[in-house]
Image (cartoon, grey):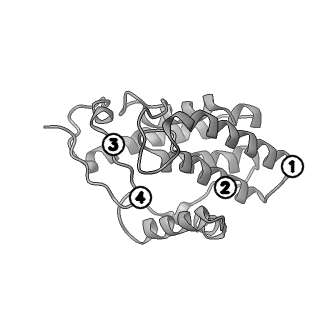
């Protein structure tokens, strides 16, 4: 019996090969997986928020991978590694490094030149990062943590609340989040910025 996962709207299914990367083989359900991932994520949050980063260090492929590894290292063998398959969302797997390099250059420019207000810079970064979809799993949670790190470490502002709820299960918070992401897909970031601060 393998890992049986039900997916909510907006979640990216794992391939069978990716499921084989599960480190804790006794996990059999989405609920159990979410619990173990959340424990790891909480450790990653503490690790990242307790450190000081310069923009030059933070806006690197190395750090993007490192924070994902910290978030999922006790659960997935492929944590911190770019996906090797194409998904129902995101760029072609061969374009991940190129698109990420472009994003990292853009966010460095935005922050150096105050192109947008701080909240918008962090949220735009989050949106583009999740759109690239670097990893097999955890891209939404990873991109939200990255936005929190940017807003706190680079701009000295409070971290986002992201609707003050759990965004994994179906519900009002998840629906509002997905609606805000769709508006951002069209270039309207106001709903996603408002959701991040709600």
> For the residue labelled by badge 2, is the local secondary structure a helix, a strand or a loop?
helix
In the rendered structure, the answer to whether residue 56 lies left or right of residue 91 reads right
Q: Is residue 89 above or below residue 17?
A: below
Q: Is residue 52 above or below residue 13?
A: above
Which mark, by number, is residue 124? 2
> For the residue labelled by badge 3, is the local secondary structure a helix, a strand or a loop?
loop
Residue 50 appears in view: no
Q: Which residue is mark 1?
A: 113
Categorize mark 3 by other alpha carbons within 10 Å: few (<14), some (14-19), many (20+).
some
Q: Position of residue 190 (x, y in %)?
A: 66, 69
Which sits earlier in the primary sequence, circle 4 or circle 1?
A: 4
- At a point 37% along the width and 61% down the height, the residue shown is 9
In the rendered structure, the answer to whether residue 84 lies left or right of residue 1 reads right
What separation in Å lies between label 4 and label 1 (alpha carbons)?
Answer: 33 Å
Number of the front mark, 1 or 3: 3
What separation in Å lies between label 4 and label 2 (alpha carbons)?
Answer: 19 Å
> For the residue labelled by badge 1, is the local secondary structure a helix, a strand or a loop?
helix
Which mark, by number, is residue 10? 4
What separation in Å lies between label 1 and label 3 (alpha carbons)?
Answer: 39 Å
Q: Which residue is mark 3?
A: 14
What separation in Å lies between label 3 and label 4 (alpha carbons)?
Answer: 13 Å
Q: Position of residue 140 (x, y in %)?
A: 49, 50
Nearer-the-camera pick, 181 or 163: 181
What separation in Å lies between label 3 and label 2 (alpha carbons)?
Answer: 26 Å
- At a point 18% along the width and 37% down the height, the residue shown is 2
Nearer-the-camera pick, 62 or 184: 184
């Amino acid at each position: 019996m393998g890992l049986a996962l039900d997916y909510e709207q907006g979640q990216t299914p794992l391939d069978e090969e990716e499921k084989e990367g599960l480190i804790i083989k006794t996990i059999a359900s989405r609920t159990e997986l979410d619990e173990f991932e959340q424990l790891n994520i909480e450790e990653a949050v503490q690790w990242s928020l307790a450190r000081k980063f310069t923009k030059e260090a933070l806006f690197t492929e190395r750090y993007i991978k490192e924070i994902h590894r910290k978030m999922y290292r006790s659960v997935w063998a492929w944590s911190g590694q770019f996906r090797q398959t194409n998904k129902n969302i995101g760029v072609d797997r061969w374009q991940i490094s190129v698109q990420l390099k472009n994003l990292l250059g853009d966010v460095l420019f935005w922050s150096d030149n105050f192109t947008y207000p701080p909240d918008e810079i962090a949220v735009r970064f989050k949106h583009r990062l999740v759109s690239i979809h670097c990893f097999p799993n955890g891209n939404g949670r990873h991109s939200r943590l990255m936005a929190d790190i940017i807003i706190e470490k680079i701009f000295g502002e409070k971290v986002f609340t992201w609707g003050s709820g759990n965004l994994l299960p179906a519900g009002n918070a998840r629906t509002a989040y997905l609606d805000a992401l769709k508006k951002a897909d069209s270039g309207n970031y106001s709903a996603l910025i408002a959701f991040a601060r709600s």
